[in-house]
Structure formats: C-alpha cells, structure tokens
Amino acid sequence: MNKLEVLKYLEDISEEVKEVSLKVWNNPETSGNEKDSSSLFRKVLKSHGFEIKEIDGMENAFIGEYGKGSPVIAVLGEYDALPGLSQSLDTKFNPVEINGPGHGCGHNLLGSAALGSVLAVKKYLEETKASGTVRFYGCPEEETLIGKVKMIKAGAFDGCDLALSWHPMNANVAIDKAYLANSSIKFKFHGISAHAAQSPESGRSALDAVELMNVGANYLREHVIDSARIHYTITNAGGAPNIVPKEAESWYFVRAPYRKDVEEITERLFKIAKGAAMMTETTVEYEILGGCYEKLPNNVLYDLTHKNMVEIGVPSYTDEELEFAKTIQETLESNLVEAEIKKYIDSDEKIFLHQEVLDKDKVDSVVVSGSSDSGDVSWIMPMNLFLTATWPLGVPAHSWQATSSSGSSMGLKGMIYAAEIFTGMMYDLLNNPKLVEEAKNEFNKRTEKRKYISPLK
Ligand SMILES: [Zn+2]
C-alpha cells in the first residue's frame, strides 16, 4: 500500500468517520461527562480490530491500540463539549437547548479526525505487516485542562515514541509554538463569624481576605511580564450581609507563555494570599486544581506536518458551503474579522474561508493563546500541532458560530483534511524510522535541562 492508497482508504471510510463526528456533535457532553462519546469511539475502534485499554480511575479515557513493535505513535482525540454553547446547524444564534452544552471548540471534529487516521493506518499496518503501533488516545476533560495531565500521571502514555495533535480552527496552519501554560488554584480563607451589626469586633471576615487578596493581585499585574494573564472569580463570598463571613473562596487562573513564568507568578500570588490572611487575621489554604504546560516545539514534526498539509492540499468547497461561511462571518464584529483575516491573507478582500496552507514565514503571526493539556504531552515526548479551517475566518473558539460550523459539511471537510494530514504523517514516520529518531533527539535536547513535573501534586 503506498501513501495514496492509504489516503484512498481513508476516503472510502470517511462517511463512517463523519457519522461519528455528527453523533458526538448532536450529543454534546461537557468535561468529565463524556460517557456516550467515549463509548462510541471505543465501539468503532473495536469494530475495526483495535484492542481497547482502560485507564485506571478515568472512566471516559481509554487507549485503542493496533499493531506491533516500534514506532509507537499516539494520536490525541478529544470529545468534550462546552457548557452554554448549544447551537443548531444555523447561520443565526439558535440554541438547541437554552444554556445547554455545545461543541463550541469543535472537539467532535478533533476526536473523529484522530479516529479516521488511526483506522487508515491500521489498514496499512495490516496489509503491509510493517512494524509499528498506532494508538488512539481517548482524552476527556480537555476544556477543564486536566484530562491529559491526569492521564500522564497514570502512566497512560508510557511506551509512546511521539504524539500527533491538531485543533479545529479558522485557518490551515502548522504551528510549533502554542498554548499558554497555566495554573488553576482555589484560595480558601477561614475567619470567625459574628453578627455584623451587634458584634462586628468579634468577627474576622474571610471575605475581606478574598477582597484584599484580589487588590494585591491587581497590583501585581503591573509587575509581571506583559504576556502573563491573571484572572479570578469569587466562588464563595459568604451567605448574608448581616453575618461576618466565616468562609470565603476565590478561584484563580495564572497563565503565561512558559511554565516557569506561571510558577513564579503563582509563588507571588501565594505571598499575596498570606498577606491578606495576615491583614484580616484569617487563615488561608490553597487547592491546586490543575495546570498545564505550554507546547514544547519540535521542528522535525513541524516540518513533517507542514509538508503533509501542502502535499495533501486543502479541501474544495461547494457554493452552499461558501455561502454558509459568508453568512456566519457576517454575524461577527467586522473590525475583528478584518484583523483576523490580515493574520492569514495579504488582501483587502473579504475572504470567508481559509483555502490555502499558511506559509511558514507567516506562522509567527498566529498566536494560540488559549491553554491546552496537550501542552503537557509535548513535554513527555515529541508532539506536533496543526489547525485546519473548520470555521469561517474570524470565528473565535468557544462561540455559537464555532458550534454551528463544527456540525456543518464545511466543518466536516476540515476534519477529514486533518485526518488526511495525520495519515500522511504516520505513513512517512512508519516508512522513515530516521524521522522518528530525529524528532526524539530534538526532544531530548530540548528537555535536557528542564524535565516535566506534573502540575498535579
Ligand atoms: Zn479546544
């Protein structure tokens, strides 16, 4: 089987892959609740002859494995949805369920592209009896940035040589540097309750501590690197105004381009929390809910990704699909859309859909400033990343427009393109063991001085 024949096989099974994608889209399950979605992926993989391995303590995570020997390639599949982003297949805001969940990050596409590619590569391994193992990683809880961190801790990735990842987006681009590292921490203050009018002097307000900590954090902003982000909510502010709050809690995210910056800023936040506790004569404890790493670059896999994206070529679209993209784009703020288009295309024309692969020299203008627990995977083995156009240009992640597009035929085309890129990459890796070695050597060099330490204690 040559590369074209493997890709032809993928085309033959593409309807089955699209069906999985739409089933997941039609039954959006939020982080930690991906029971039906993970079962569906297990079922399809099993029916194609994959062995299913469970992961201790994680009901909705699993591995589907096929093949023998090295290299062992991990393909990352996600399938969780987002709360509040319910949307039907429509070009105007039209939720299926008011405030219900929806695939506003396109993870229905993310998981099924990974699935399609492993099914195609399985066929190749079966026909050629070539050495190599392909693993589909069913990764839940990405939106809460914790699934893969837990999976790494559970040893689920042991034995892999490298990992392949992608994300649905509004452009076709191979990316090497991405994701902000982050930490998620809850601060719980404990005080003494009292009647707020009759005996305020005997009370010590935990809420005062939360507020003073926030003041401190807001002053800290001026003295951290520009690219750092600190955001918080108050998750417990006491019960009633006439009771001095005995308990209060805030929830912080700290993000920065590099994990080491996140750790430094977090340490300073701990000092602020202690200071707030001291000022109010309360006590404070921290709960680290999770955290993740930025993506570690790997030039070898980046080049291989870009090469396959160009070689395979972007999908072509029907007039209806282009019209759908145009109408969706028209619902967005035009200034933002124009700024977004400029990142990808040197043109003043209004373009609805990205229909080329971004040149390497323009990649730096694409900043993936969200966080992802995939970043952690890139610190335990070489990992690539690319985006394909599954949404019209300008559509942001976590929007109803993204939910709608992720269930459209335009979105499904971007998903199949992603599956083809994965398939092409795996074909190259299986046929050229030197590439695997080079990617691993680069990884070893990059991690010589900094090893991965789980953000989970
Ligand atoms: Zn996502």
Image (spheres, rainbow, N blue to C red):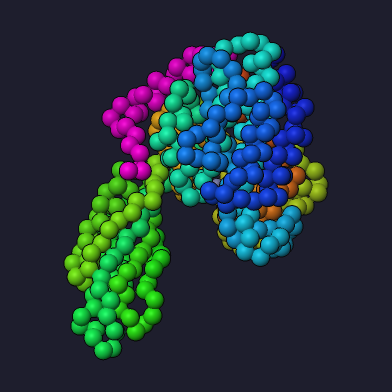
One can see residue 342 in this view: no
Vertical position of residue 387 compared to residue 310: above or below: below
Residue 367 as seen in the image, left or right of residue 241: right
Residue occupying image coordinates x 36% and y 43%: 456
Q: Position of residue 191 (x, y in %)?
A: 25, 70
- Asked whether the viewer can see residue 210, the reply is yes
Instruction: Indicate yes or no whether the magenta region holds residue 380.
Output: no
In the picture as drawn, the residue positioned furthest to the bottom comes out as: 198
Residue at the outermost right position? 319
Residue 151 locus on image (x, y percent)? 46, 36
Q: In the displayed structure, does residue 308 sit left or right of residue 151?
A: right
Task: Identify which residue, 184 or 449, lies in the foreground.
Answer: 184
Q: Is residue 249 left or right of residue 113?
A: left
Q: In the figure, residue 328 lies in which quadrant?
A: bottom right
**Outermost residue toward the top in this view:** 129
- Residue 5 location in percent, x, y? 73, 18
Q: Residue at x 35, y 65 (%)?
A: 249
Quarter in which the N terminus is drawn: top right
Q: Which residues fall within the magenta stretch?
A: 428-457
Q: In which quadrant of the rendered view does residue 338 lie? A: bottom right
The quadrant of the rendering that contains the C terminus is top left
Residue 321 is left or right of residue 216, and the answer is: right
Indicate whether residue 436 is drawn in magenta: yes
Q: Name the dominant secondary structure of the magenta segment.
A: helix
- In the image, residue 316 lies at what x, y percent? 75, 38
